[in-house]
């Protein structure tokens, strides 16, 4: 998972749709981008997970809280993002943890 | 007459009748004389004087003299007389005539005589002499002087003139101031003559007083002394000699020769006397030596005679120390007493040899020692001594060796005997033990091993015993003084040895016999163990098996148990026989023990089992058999009952099961909802529900049968594949299914109504859903859903955006991550997708209406427009409106609305 930060210069709109939140039991993510919008220009991509908003951890925020936080960043929005891995429901391969030649 | 004494024994040296050589000298002299006379008339004068005096000194003895040398010999008579006097021989009778020829004849006789004495007279004729030729006469006289006074002089093998000269030199050698080199100038100072006289007669001249510068005095002294005491007339004149540069050699020689003859003769007499004395002295010495020899020889022989018996003594001493002393005495003899005797013997030999040599040298007869004292006797005696000596030494050493050996042997014997005795101590007792009588086989074997070791030890000691006996033997042979005690000890040892041997053999026999017995018993015990062990196991197994609790679930099982039991019963008789045999072995063991008087209850090392154990187990078995029979029968009965129950249950279950199955399928079909409307579906479902409820009594009945089975602990039933659990689960599933399906349909109705879907739309969704619901269980798996989405045009293929999109969608349709997509969720998704943007906006629009077209809403408005609960819900959840121009407490309904759907556009 690549994590990266973007800084969008205001003012709003930022050009993205925020989805998820703690109350939805789904991590915050970018579900739509306005083509040519500030977010799209900054390299944000649909599906990116939002890790932090304005430096604060976003994992514990409800949707409304996240929404309000973003709205509070008037002139400059700092987002900590992570490029998504494909579908969470698919089990992740546990690396190449098998010892060569061993294992039962 | 001058006689020249020549000692006998002197070699044939130069004698008076030397041939040849003498002649040569004569000739020379005459020639010289010829020349000299011509040159020096002084000489003639001297010679005349000297020769005249010389002739007179001889003629005096005949009672005549000559006055004039050239005249008085003219008739030859005095010449012949002279010759007779000086030679001591008779000449032929002279002629008495006075005629010339008579004179010549006489002179010739004289000359012939001279010639007959080996003198070559050359150029001297009788006529010249008769004529009175001075020169000739002087020459003739010189020849006579030479021949008769000088020629015979022999000094140290040098003769004549050289001899005379040598004699002068020898005699005057001690006198430093005299150096005689010739017969002329050397004599001029007169010291030579004086020296010559002094040498022989020191009493006549005081030589020390003579002075070289008084030659005349010296000469006259000499002349006078010679004339007075030595009977040598003056022949020379002192003044003539001194004044003449070179005195006449012949005159001097003539005069000096007189001295020679005077002294030499005296010397010879002296020598003769000396010789006689010497000879006598030699004789005396020899006699003394002989005496000494005899004496020494006697002494030596006596000593030998004394010593030999001592050396021949062969009486030994008993003790080593005494013999050592003897040896020391012998050493003293060799070192102290004998060497001087050796010296003596040596001396004796030397003396003897010396004596013999001396005797031989002095031409005496050899010394013959007296009888028994011959050199050979002495040598023999000495040899004998040495032999005896050697023999004695040898004997001493051998005796000492013998004693030494005896000592050594005795010590060795003592030592070995002691060692042996200590080794045998206790062995006899040990061998007499009867410790094997109560020993086990193992112990007896160990005893045998030990006995073997002892036997080999014994064998090893055999050598030693023999050695001890050999030592005793040798001591006896060597005549040991304590042989008796040695012998008795040796005998004791040998007797004991025999005894040991006997006892050893007896013990071996006893041990072997015991071993055999015990082995036999052991074998029997082994046999017993070998058979008793498995039998015991069988017994144990039988006891266990007979008491074995079973758990059977069928009649067949029970039946097989019964059969097994019957089979077992069949083996009992054979087992009993085996038991008998085993016990028989034990009784045989007992019999052996009794017969041979062994311990009666020898424990069996191979097995702890006793016959008692066997018997008791056997009894146990006998008891258990019938009881088992009984219990088996009881079991059989029970099993049959169970079987009946099973069948009962099965019959029922076989009816219920399929009914439920059928119903499930029916419900499923209804749930698929492809026939008619939702209401129709619902009706059908309700009907089914009713049927199902009515059927419950069958389930209950089945439960009853099942309970019976359980009470009888029957857990299997081959008459039906349906277990109670199956049925229950199926029943519940059916109930659940019907309820759920009804619920689903109800929801679908709601949804339809809510979303305003028509039946056809619903049927379409249904068809799509069913199409992708591969498993036909009313749910879609994620892959199914994905396929469905793709078929609807969603781009889910590109990675990673496609995956991200699908993930997003999945979170929406399956928020609880159950892993399946229900039809309801599917419908929701499908309807939502097309209407989702509206939905949030619709709510916002709705709120706006309620808020009177404001961008915010107040709590009062909410309370006024919405039911209380919902209003409070909104008031709690909404955040304060942040826009301008809003009163306190204004709430932001936009954020709230979007938050409701979990989506906000920012």
Image (cartoon, helix red, strand yellow):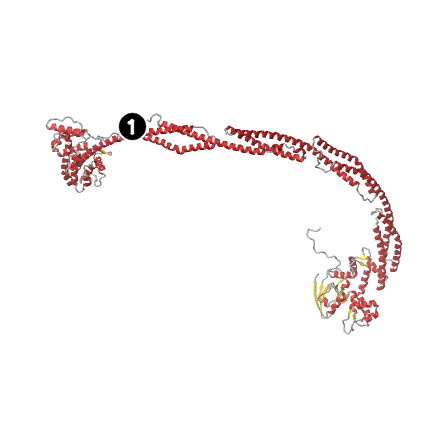
Instruction: Work out whether residue B35 can be spotted.
Output: no
Image location of residue B850, percent across then percent down: 82, 70
Camera-side residue: B216 or B73? Answer: B216
Which quarter of the rendered picture does the C terminus of chain B lie within?
Answer: bottom right
- Compared with residue B817, is residue B640 higher up or lower down, i.e. above or below? above
Q: Which residue is mark 1?
A: B364
Camera-side residue: B171 or B803? Answer: B171
Subunit under mark 1 = B
Secondary structure of the residue carrying numbered label 1: loop
- Compared with residue B717, is residue B798 higher up or lower down, i.e. above or below? below
- Compared with residue A8, is residue B206 higher up or lower down, i.e. above or below? above
Image location of residue B124, percent across then percent down: 15, 32
Q: Quadrant of residue A83?
A: bottom right
Q: Number of marks in the image?
A: 1
Instruction: Work out whether residue B509 can be spotted.
Output: yes
Farthest bottom residue?
B885
Badge 1: residue crowd in 10 Å (few <14, some 14–19, many ≥20) = few
Image location of residue B171, percent across then percent down: 22, 37
* B681 to the left or right of B48: right
Image location of residue B696, percent across then percent down: 88, 53
* B332 to the left or right of B73: right
């Amino acid at each position: 998972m690549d994590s990266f930060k973007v800084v969008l210069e205001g003012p709003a709109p930022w050009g993205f749709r925020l989805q998820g939140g703690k109350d939805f039991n789904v991590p915050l993510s970018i579900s739509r981008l306005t083509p040519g919008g500030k977010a799209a220009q900054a390299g944000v991509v649909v599906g990116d997970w939002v890790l932090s908003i304005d430096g604060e951890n976003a994992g514990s925020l409800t949707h409304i809280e996240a929404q309000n936080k973003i709205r509070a960043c008037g002139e400059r929005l700092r987002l900590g993002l992570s490029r998504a891995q494909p579908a969470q429901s698919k089990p992740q391969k546990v690396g190449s943890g098998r010892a060569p030649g061993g294992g039962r | 007459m001058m006689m020249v004494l020549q000692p006998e024994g002197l070699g044939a040296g130069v004698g008076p009748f030397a041939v040849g050589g003498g002649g040569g000298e004569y000739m020379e002299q005459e020639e010289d004389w010829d020349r000299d006379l011509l040159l020096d008339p002084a000489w003639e004068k001297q010679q005349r004087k000297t020769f005249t005096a010389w002739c007179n000194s001889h003629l005096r003895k005949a009672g005549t003299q000559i006055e004039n040398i050239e005249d008085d010999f003219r008739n030859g008579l005095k010449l012949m007389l002279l010759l007779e006097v000086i030679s001591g021989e008779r000449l032929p009778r002279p002629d008495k005539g006075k005629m010339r020829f008579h004179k010549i004849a006489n002179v010739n006789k004289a000359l012939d005589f001279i010639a007959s004495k080996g003198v070559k007279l050359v150029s001297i004729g009788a006529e010249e002499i008769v004529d009175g030729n001075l020169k000739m006469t002087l020459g003739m006289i010189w020849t006579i002087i030479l021949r008769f006074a000088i020629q015979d002089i022999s000094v140290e093998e040098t003769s004549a003139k050289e001899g005379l000269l040598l004699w002068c030199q020898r005699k005057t050698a001690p006198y430093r101031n005299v150096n005689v080199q010739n017969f002329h100038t050397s004599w001029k100072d007169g010291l030579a003559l004086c020296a010559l006289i002094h040498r022989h007669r020191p009493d006549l001249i005081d030589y020390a007083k003579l002075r070289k510068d008084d030659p005349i005095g010296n000469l006259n002294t000499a002349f006078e002394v010679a004339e007075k005491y030595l009977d040598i007339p003056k022949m020379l004149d002192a003044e003539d000699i001194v004044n003449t540069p070179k005195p006449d050699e012949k005159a001097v020689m003539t005069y000096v020769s007189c001295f020679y003859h005077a002294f030499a003769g005296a010397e010879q007499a002296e020598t003769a006397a000396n010789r006689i004395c010497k000879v006598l002295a030699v004789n005396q010495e020899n006699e003394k030596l002989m005496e000494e020899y005899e004496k020494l020889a006697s002494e030596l022989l006596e000593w030998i005679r004394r010593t030999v018996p001592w050396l021949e003594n062969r009486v030994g001493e008993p003790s080593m120390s005494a013999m050592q002393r003897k040896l020391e005495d012998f050493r003293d003899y060799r070192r102290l007493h004998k060497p001087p005797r050796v010296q003596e013997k040596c001396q004796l030999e030397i003396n003897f040899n010396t004596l013999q040599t001396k005797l031989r040298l002095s031409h005496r007869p050899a010394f013959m020692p007296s009888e028994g004292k011959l050199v050979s006797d002495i040598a023999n005696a000495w040899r004998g001594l040495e032999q005896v000596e050697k023999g004695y030494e040898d004997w001493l050493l051998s005796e000492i060796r013998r004693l030494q050996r005896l000592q050594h042997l005795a010590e060795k014997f003592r030592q070995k005997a002691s060692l042996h005795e200590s080794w045998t101590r206790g062995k006899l007792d040990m061998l007499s033990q009867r410790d094997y009588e109560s020993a086990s086989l193992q112990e007896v074997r160990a005893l045998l091993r030990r006995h073997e070791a002892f036997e080999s030890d014994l064998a090893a000691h055999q050598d030693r015993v023999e050695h001890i006996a050999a030592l005793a033997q040798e001591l006896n042979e060597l005549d040991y003084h304590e042989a008796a005690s040695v012998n008795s000890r040796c005998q004791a040892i040998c007797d004991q040895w025999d005894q040991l041997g006997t006892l050893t053999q007896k013990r071996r026999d006893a041990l072997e016999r015991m071993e055999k017995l015990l082995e036999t018993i052991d074998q029997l015990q082994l046999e017993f163990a070998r058979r008793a062990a498995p039998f015991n196991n069988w017994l144990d197994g039988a006891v266990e098996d007979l008491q074995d609790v079973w758990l059977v679930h069928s009649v067949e099982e029970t039946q097989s148990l019964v059969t097994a039991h019957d089979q077992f019963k069949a083996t009992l008789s054979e087992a009993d026989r085996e038991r008998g045999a085993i016990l028989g072995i034990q009784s045989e063991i007992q019999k052996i023990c009794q017969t041979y008087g062994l311990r009666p209850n020898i424990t069996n090392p191979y097995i702890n089992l006793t016959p008692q154990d066997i018997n008791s187990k056997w009894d146990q078995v006998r008891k258990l058999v019938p009881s088992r029979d009984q219990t088996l029968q009881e079991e059989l009965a029970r099993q049959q009952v169970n079987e009946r129950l099973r069948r009962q249950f099965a019959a029922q279950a076989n009816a219920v099961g399929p009914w439920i199955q059928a119903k499930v399928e029916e419900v499923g079909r209804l749930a698929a909802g492809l026939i008619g409307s939702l209401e129709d579906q619902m009706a059908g479902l309700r009907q089914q529900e009713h049927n199902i409820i009515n059927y419950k009594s069958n389930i209950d009945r089945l439960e009853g049968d099942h309970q019976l089975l359980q009470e009888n602990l029957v857990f299997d039933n081959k008459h039906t594949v349906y277990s109670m659990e199956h049925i229950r689960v199926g029943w519940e599933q059916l109930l659940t299914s019907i309820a759920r399906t009804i619920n689903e349909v109800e929801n679908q109705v709601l949804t339809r109504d809510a979303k305003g879907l028509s039946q056809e739309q619903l049927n379409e969704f249904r068809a799509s859903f069913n199409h992708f619901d591969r498993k036909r269980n009313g749910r879609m798996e994620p892959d199914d859903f994905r396929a469905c989405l793709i078929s609807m045009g969603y781009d889910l293929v590109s990675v990673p955006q496609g995956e991200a999109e699908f993930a997003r969608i999945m979170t929406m349709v399956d928020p609880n991550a159950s892993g399946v997509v229900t039809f309801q969720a599917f419908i929701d998704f499908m309807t939502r997708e097309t209407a989702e943007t509206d939905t949030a906006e619709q709510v916002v629009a709705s709120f706006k209406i309620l808020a009177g077209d404001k961008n915010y809403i107040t709590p009062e408005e909410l309370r006024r427009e919405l039911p209380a609960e919902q209003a409070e819900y909104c008031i709690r959840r909404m955040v304060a409106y942040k826009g301008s121009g809003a009163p306190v407490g204004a709430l932001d309904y936009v954020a709230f609305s979007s938050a409701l759907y979990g989506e906000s556009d920012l």
